[in-house]
Amino acid sequence: MDFLNELNDSQKVAAKHMYGAAMVIAGAGSGKTRVLTYRIAHMMENNIDPFNILALTFTNKAAKEMTERISSIAGGHEAKNITMGTFHSVFSKILRFNADRIGFPSNFTIYDTQDSKSLIKDIIKGFNLDDKTYKPSQVFGRISTAKNNLISPEDYNDNPEIKLEDKQSRRPEMGRIYTSYMNRCQRSGAMDFDDLLYYTNILLRDFPDVLHYYQHKFKYILVDEYQDTNFAQYLIIKQLAAAYENICVVGDDAQSIYSFRGANIENILNFKKDYPDFSLFKLEQNYRSTKNIVEAANSVIKNNKDQIHKKVWTDNQTGDKLEVIRTLTDNEEGRAISAKIFDKQKSGGSFNDFAILYRTNRQSRSFEESLRKLNIPYKVYGGLSFYQRKEIKDLLAYFRLSANPNDEEALKRVINYPRRAIGKTSIEKLIVAANKYSTSIWEVISDFQKYPVEINRGTQTRIGEFVTMIKSFQAEVNEKDAFTLAERIAKSSGIMRELINEKNKGPEEVERFQNIEELLGGIQEFVNSNEDDSVKTLADFMLEVALLTDADQDKPEEKNHVSLMTIHSSKGLEFPNVYLVGLEENLFPSQMALQSRTDLEEERRLFYVAVTRAMHSCTISYASSRFLWGQAISCEPSRFLDEIDPNYLSFNTVKQPMGKGSFGNKFQTARTGGLNKNLGAPPPGNLRSLKDVKRAQASNNESNASNTEIKVGFNVEHERFGKGKVTHMEGSGADQKATIFFPHHGSKTILLRFANLEVLE
C-alpha cells in the first residue's frame, strides 16, 4: 500500500475509508479524482471484489483514465472487473440486458438531441400546431425536464399545476406532444439520453428482482462530481445503495454549474439527511493555482449562502495578481487580449498554455478576428462535433438502420440519400400511414399490401430496392466485424460514390470525403483494439459512439493553439494562463440569472470555476460598451469584480494610440490603480464605488453629448479616432447620430450619447 504515501494527510484519510456512507468535499485543484482512484485501489488491496464495485463518472474519458491508473496500481486484469463509466453508459447496458421488461428491443437506438428535435418537429406538424409557439428546442427542453424529474406523460397530463403552466405559456398541447413523443420513440425502438435514466428508474421501481440483483452486485458505490447529478441520477444511486449503504460521493458544491441540464445542488447539500451517520472528508489544499488566484476565488465564493464551508489554500508560490483590463469596446477587448497572448508567448512557451473563457459562445467573434490578424493559431471548443457533421450523420444513419430498421429518424434521413427520386410528399405519406396503423415506417415500406399507401408504382419500386439493401446489411450486422460491414455500407449505399463525385468541387467537399475516411479509420481502430477473440460488431461501435460526451469527442491534438471555450466547457480543465473575458453586468452574471438568489449563486459558482482553471496567471477583462443587435450598448463592470478582494487585483486600462488605424500592443497601467483611467483610486476595500463611478461617467457622457449642441462643420476630438470634422447629423435626443470624417480612419457614424466628443475651438 505504498501508493497511499503519494497522498497528503487529508487525501489519505479519505482514500482509506471503505465502509459506510462518505462524502468527500474537494476544492478546485485538490486532487479529488486521485483520491477516488486510490480509494478503489485500496479497496481491492483489502480483498474487496472488483465485481462488487460501481464507479460512476460524467465522462468516459475520466472513467478510462481512472481504470488505467487503478490497473497500474492494483493489476490490470482485476481492474477490468470494476463496473466503471458514465451514468448513461453503465445504465444503457443494464437496460439492454433487461429491455424486454420495459417493452424495448435489446438493440434499441439512442437518439441524440438532433434526432429528438426532428421527431418533435414532425409531431408538431402532424398536430397542425404553430412551430413558432411550439419551438422544437423549447418543447424538447420541457420534455427533458419532465423526464429528469421522473414525471411520466400520464402524470404530466394529470397534473393541474403543470397544465396551468403550459396554458399560461400558450402551449396547452405540450402534454399531448410529450405523450406522442414517447409513443413514437418506443415504436421506433429508440431512447434519448434522458430515457436511459428515466427507464432505469422504472426498471428498478417496477421489478424488485432486478433491483435486488444490482443492489447485491454493486455493494460498493462511488460517484464522481456528485454536485452535477439530477433527480433521476440521485434516485438510481439511492435505490442501489439502500441494501449496504457503502456509498462514497465526491464533489464540490462550489462547482455546481449545470442546473440548466437538471443538476440539483441539493443532492450534495442534503447528503447528510439521507445518510445521517456519514463520514465527511474535506480536501482543501489546491495543487493547481497560485496563492493570489486561490485567494481571489475564495473571496468571491464566500458570498454564497448555500454552501458547505471549506477554506481552500495552497502552498504554491504567491504569483502575480489577477490583472483587470478595461477596454472601450468589445472589439478592442478582442485586440487587447490577443496582443497580451502574442507578447507573452514571444517570451517563451506554447500557445497551448493559453485559454480564453467566455460566458456565451457568441462572444468568441472578436477574439477569433483578432487572433487571426496576429496569425495566432486557435481552436474554438463546443462547436459542431465530428459526429454531428452531415456526412457523418448520414452514414451513421445507415449503420443505425442496419442494427434497428424501426429507427424512424435514421430512416427519414437516408431513404432519399443519395437521391433515389423518393420525394418529400411520398415520405410524408409514409409517416401518416405509420401513424394511422400505429406501426413503424419500416413495417409500412416492407409490406405495402398490408399497409396500403397512395404512392405511385415507380416510387414503390425504388422504396422496395432500398428495403432490400437495408435487409442485406441487417443480415450481416451480427456476423461481420464493424469495419468490414461499415466499409460495405459506405460503398453500397452510394454515399462514397456521392462524395467522390464532389471531391473536385472545392475544399469543403474534399473535407467531407476525408471525414468519412476518418470515420472508417476510427472503426478499424475500434475493431483492432479488441483484447479477446469476440467479434466487435457495428452495433457495438454505435453504442460507444452514441454515449460519447463532448469531452470524450475532443481528441488531443499536436497542433499548437490557443483554446477558446465557454466556462461551462472548461469545467475539469486547467491552463497555465487564463483570460476571463466579458465581465459585465447582464452578461456575466447573465441577465437571466438576476431573478433569484439561487440563479445568482450559480453564476457566482461559474465565476469561481472560471478563475480556478488558471494555474499561473488569470486576466479578467470587460468593455465599456458592447455592440448588441446592431447598437452600441453601454456596459458596467460585473458585480463579481467588486467581490474580489482588491489585494489580489491589479488594474490596467487599454490606451488606444491617437491617429492610428491598428490597435497595437499598447497597455498603460492606470496611475490611480482603478478600472477607469483618469479617475480617482477607489477607497480601500471598496470596489463597489468603481461601479458608481462608472455610472457617473456614463451619465456625464450622456449629458455632454446632449447638452453640447454639435452641428455640421464642427471640429471635434474622439477618444479613439482622434480629431475629426462633423459632416452630417441625424436623429434627435438619445438617438442623435453624427457622421464625422477622421483623417486617419475615414468617415464614422457615431451615436452621440456614447461618443463623449470634445468640441474643439
Image: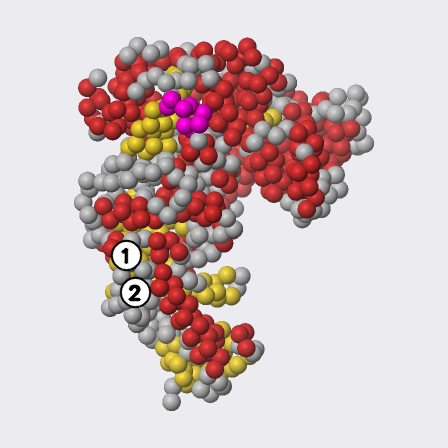
- For the N terminus, give its image quadrant: top left
Quadrant in the picture for the C terminus: bottom left
Q: Residue at x 40, y 44 (%)?
A: 305
Residue 400: horizontal and vertical position, in percent?
Answer: 57, 26
User: Which mark is first along the chain, 2 or 1?
Assistant: 1
Residue 496: in sight, yes or no? yes
**Residue found 19% across the figure and 40% down from its top:** 315
Say which element carries label 2.
Answer: loop
Q: Is residue 709 above or below residue 106?
A: below
Q: Position of residue 449 (x, y in %)?
A: 80, 21
Vertically, is 505 above or below 651? above
Does residue 377 lie above or below 399 as drawn? Answer: below
> What residue does disc 1 label?
646
Q: Residues within 10 Å of mark 2 (few under 14, many from 20)?
A: some
Q: Is 315 on the left or on the right of 65, as rendered? A: left
Discs 1, 2 touching: Cβ within 8 Å: yes
- Cα distance, mark 1 to mark 2? 10 Å
Residue in the foreground of this view, choosing between 508 and 406: 406
Question: SS at mark 1?
Answer: helix
Q: Residue at x 32, y 63 (%)?
A: 675
Residue 9 part of the magenta-drawn span: no
The residue range painted magenta reads: 271-278
Q: Nearer the viewer, residue 757 or 707?
A: 707
Q: Which mark identifies residue 614?
A: none
Residue 567 in view, yes or no: no
Task: Name the residue that disc number 2 marks.
Answer: 682
Along the horizontal axis of the image, is 474 left or right of 620?
right
